[in-house]
Amino acid sequence: MKLDFQRSGQQNKMFHAILGQIAKQASHLGSTWSTEDWKRLHLNNFCKERGLPSGRLVQALDGQGLVQLGLQSRKLSKEEAIEFTEYLMAWCAQNGITINEVPQTPIRPQQGAFRGR
């Protein structure tokens, strides 16, 4: 029996839908940002808050600007993906972001439910 500890496709859809709502409604530094930009901003903050590795910044190969390395949502475990989704929902509530168009799936599985493959 193989256990799947990586985030599920449904978890991925859910937090990307929330990030899409953030991209439509929020601004940062006086600008609007893409869903991918918001994912990077929130994933960085989430990892810092949880004491998880948050990637690192290095100078671009041409010396013009910075590139963030190592921080990828696909590396989140199922539990981290649950926590990231909860973090996003709390951030939205605190910042007046209305969440709609989110896939309907329970965030946390029922207690005692086995989620292996």
Image (tube, rainbow, N blue to C red):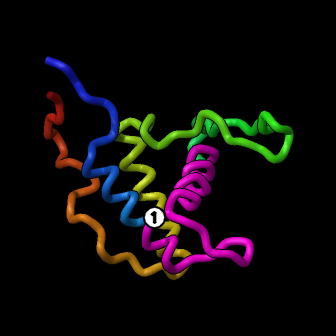
Looking at the image, which residue sits at the far top?
Answer: 1
Residue shown at 31%/56% (left/top)?
13
Q: Quick check: 117 above or below 48?
A: above
At 65% from the left and 35% from the top, the residue drawn is 69
Is 10 in the magenta? no
Of 113 and 74, which appears nearest the observer? 74
Q: What residue is shown at x 22% (from left), y 24% (from top)?
A: 3
Q: Secondary structure at mark 1?
A: helix
Crowding at label 1, few (<14), some or many (≥20) Cα neighbours within 10 Å? many
Q: Determine the residue located farthest toward the right in the rendered image.
A: 63
Identify which amino acid the numbered label 1 is placed on: Leu
Secondary structure, magenta segment, majority class: helix
Q: Is residue 113 left or right of residue 40?
A: left
Residue 29 lies left or right of residue 108; in this view the side is right
- In the rendered view, does 23 fall on the left or right side of 17? right
Locate the N terminus by quadrant. top left
The image quadrant where one finds the C terminus is top left
Q: Position of residue 35 (x, y in %)?
A: 50, 63
Rendered view: 6 above or below 14: above
Quadrant position of residue 51: top right
| Residue 113: percent from left, percent from top | 14, 40
Q: Where is residue 67 shown, x and y percent of the image?
A: 71, 42
Q: What are the residue bounds of the magenta stretch?
A: 20-48
Q: Nearer the viewer, residue 51 or 15?
A: 15
Q: Is residue 44 magenta?
A: yes
In percent of width and height, residue 23 lies at 51, 71
Q: Residue drawn 22% across and 57% down?
A: 106
Q: Which residue is mark 1?
A: 19
Query: In screen coordinates, is 16 left or right of 51?
Result: left
